[in-house]
Image (spheres, rainbow, N blue to C red):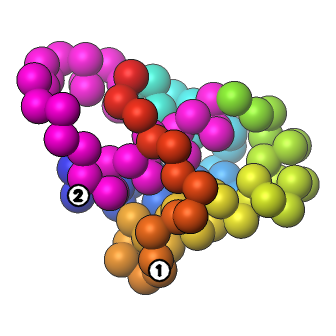
Amino acid sequence: MSDKSTATSFYVEGMLAGSLPFDELQIFIWDTLEEWHQLHIDSHYICEKEKVMWHLFHLLERWPESTLRGNVFLRKQLEDGCRFLKQQGPMLHQCLGVRP
């Protein structure tokens, strides 16, 4: 989980900064979903980092790049989520991260 949270922060921050194409972020998300599907996790327990990661993935799949960059609320959710994943900020207040 730690590796994926670090990679998620890297990709999201790169997209927000304009240094990483949105298409590459989308490929990372789909690769992660494919890897996740192969894990066969039976536990219903979900840690806070995982909740935040799924929350960010949901936002990134739901909204187009222009909205994610331009909408103040969504951009702040992404930035705050990245800070949390890097252990540099608090848990998101409105985090609805659910496993696929």
Residue 3 can be seen in this image = no
The amino acid marked with disc number 1 is Gly
The amino acid marked with disc number 2 is Ser
Residue nearest the observer in this picture, 24 or 59: 59
Residue nearest the observer in this picture, 78 or 31: 78
Could you say where residue 21 lies in the image, as x and y percent from the top left? Answer: 68, 43
State left or right for residue 70 relative to residue 16.
Answer: right
Q: Residues within 10 Å of mark 2 (few under 14, many from 20)?
A: few
Q: Look at the picture and state if 45 lies above or below 14.
A: above
Please tell me whether residue 54 belongs to the stretch shown in magenta: yes
The part of the image, by quadrant, that contains residue 66 is top right
Work out how far the residue at label 2 is from the one at label 1, CA to CA, in angstroms: 16 Å
Q: Residue at image x 41%, y 34%?
A: 98
Could you say where residue 59 lies in the image, as x and y percent from the top left? Answer: 64, 39
Give the residue at mark 1.
89
Instruction: Report the span colored magenta.
Output: 32-61
The part of the image, by quadrant, that contains residue 5 is bottom left
Give the residue at mark 2.
2
